[in-house]
């Protein structure tokens, strides 16, 4: 891929928004909208980024351009995917999805410049029932291992998915205890953008 085509790919994904979560001590962690990074402006500075998703595929479909941009900029990008993606109705293989999706995730990670991938085995579609302290501990483990400058999640208000909401809550709790800023990828038009 040439430098020009990479720039074109990133510009074509420009409608996707990111915003930084406010860090507040002593309050419930939540993702709050702050002025977004305008299209064509630099990403938030980060030497290392930890990304937390509910299922394989989100790193590509929802966050691919951002992850690629961070890795092209020289950031170390590490991904924690909390399920194996076995609940997807889109299974066109004879293999069980819980074996295919992690493999697809590894391939996508290589293309996007993600240098570290960890896949947990919480039930896909059931994260909203998983204990928040256990999920938070998984995220804290990634934070300790990779010492990131930024944590990246999907904005649950934009996705409307209960699993994404549980992931964002656990990620925000872990980030808050580490004093780490959280950025959330929102959909175009979400949160008044």
Image (cartoon, rainbow, N blue to C red):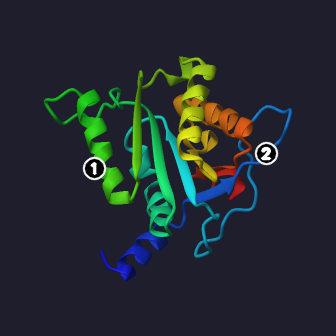
The percent position of residue 54, horizontal first and vertical second, equals 47, 34
Q: Is residue 148 visible?
A: yes
User: Going 61% across and 28% down the picture, which residue do you hit?
Assistant: 136
- Quick one: label 2 or label 1, which is nearer the N terminus? 2
Determine whether, in the image, residue 34 is placed left or right of residue 87: right
The percent position of residue 41, horizontal first and vertical second, equals 62, 74
- Between 56 and 73, the one lying in front of the other is 73
Residue closest to the far bottom = 4
Q: Is residue 184 visible?
A: no
Determine whether, in the image, residue 114 is placed left or right of residue 95: right
For label 1, the residue is: 107
For label 2, the residue is: 23
Determine whether, in the image, residue 29 is placed left or right of residue 169: right
The percent position of residue 33, horizontal first and vertical second, equals 74, 52
- Tag 1 secondary structure: helix
Determine whether, in the image, residue 173 is placed left or right of residue 125: right
User: Going 59% across and 50% down the picture, which residue do you hit?
Assistant: 148
- CA separation in Å, label 2 and label 1: 34 Å
- Between 90 and 111, the one lying in front of the other is 111
**For the residue carrying disc 2, how many other residues have a C-alpha within 10 Å: few (<14), some (14-19), or many (20+)?**
some
The percent position of residue 163, horizontal first and vertical second, equals 53, 29
- Tag 2 secondary structure: loop
Determine the image quadrant of residue 131: top right
- Reply above or below: 139 against 109: above
Residue closest to the far right = 26
């Amino acid at each position: 891929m040439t430098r020009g085509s990479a720039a074109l790919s990133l510009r074509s994904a420009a409608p996707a928004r990111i915003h930084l979560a406010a860090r507040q001590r002593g309050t419930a962690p939540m993702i709050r909208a702050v002025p977004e990074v305008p299209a064509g402006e630099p990403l938030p500075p980060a030497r290392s980024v930890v990304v937390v998703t509910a299922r394989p595929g989100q790193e590509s479909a929802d966050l691919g351009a951002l992850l690629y941009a961070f890795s092209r900029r020289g950031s170390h990008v590490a991904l924690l995917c909390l399920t194996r993606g076995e609940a997807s109705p889109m299974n066109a293989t004879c293999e069980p999805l819980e074996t295919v999706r992690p493999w697809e995730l590894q391939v996508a990670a290589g293309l996007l410049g993600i240098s570290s991938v960890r896949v947990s085995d919480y039930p896909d579609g059931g994260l909203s029932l998983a204990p928040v302290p256990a999920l938070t501990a998984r995220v804290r483990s990634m934070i300790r291992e990779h010492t990131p400058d930024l944590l990246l999640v999907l904005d649950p208000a934009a996705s409307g998915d209960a699993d994404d909401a549980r992931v964002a809550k656990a990620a925000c709790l872990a980030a808050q205890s580490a004093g780490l800023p959280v950025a959330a990828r929102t959909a175009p038009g979400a949160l008044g953008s």
